[in-house]
């Protein structure tokens, strides 16, 4: 019984963590140039307005 709980806990952890990591990776494009960096800083400074 203990082994089954451990396996279920690990499975639950993978099912929760993996999709969240994929979502984060896809929602933030990489910054290849200095212009990309300035654009990101400008977007961040306007966040919540």
Image (cartoon, rainbow, N blue to C red):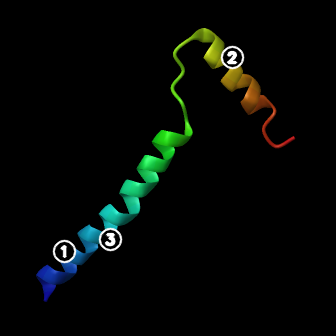
Residue at image position (60%, 10%) is 34
Residue lying at the far right in this picture: please name it: 49
Position of 19 relative to 39 (above/below)? below
Looking at the image, tell me whether mark 1 or mark 2 is earlier in sequence order.
1
Instruction: Provide residue 20's location: percent of width, then percent of height.
Output: 45, 54
Residue at image position (35%, 65%) is 15
Check the picture and name the quadrant holding the C terminus: top right
Using residue 26 as the reference point, say whether residue 9 is left or right of it.
Answer: left
Instruction: Provide residue 38's location: percent of width, then percent of height.
Output: 69, 16
Please tell me how many numbered marks the rendered image carries: 3
Q: Residues within 10 Å of mark 2 (few under 14, many from 20)?
A: few
Using residue 10 as the reference point, say whether residue 20 is left or right of it.
Answer: right
Residue on which the image places disc 1: 7
Residue on which the image places disc 3: 12
Residue at image position (31%, 62%) is 14
Q: Secondary structure at mark 2?
A: helix
Position of 2 relative to 6 (above/below)? below
Using residue 47 as the reference point, say whether residue 32 is left or right of it.
Answer: left
Looking at the image, tell me whether mark 1 or mark 3 is earlier in sequence order.
1
State which quadrant residue 12 falls in.
bottom left
In contact (CB < 8 Å): disc 1 and disc 3: no
Residue at image position (36%, 55%) is 18
Q: Secondary structure at mark 3?
A: helix
Q: What is the C-alpha distance between the residues marked 2 and 3?
A: 39 Å
Q: What is the C-alpha distance between the residues marked 1 and 2?
A: 46 Å
- Which dot marks residue 23? none
Looking at the image, tell me whether mark 2 or mark 3 is earlier in sequence order.
3
Check the picture and name the quadrant holding the N terminus: bottom left
Instruction: Provide residue 39's location: percent of width, then percent of height.
Output: 70, 20
In contact (CB < 8 Å): disc 1 and disc 2: no
Residue on which the image places disc 2: 38
In contact (CB < 8 Å): disc 2 and disc 3: no
């Amino acid at each position: 019984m203990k082994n089954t709980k451990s396996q279920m806990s690990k499975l639950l952890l993978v099912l929760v963590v993996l999709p969240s990591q994929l979502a984060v990776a896809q929602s933030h494009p990489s910054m290849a140039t200095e212009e990309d960096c300035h654009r990101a800083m400008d977007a961040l400074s306007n966040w919540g307005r």
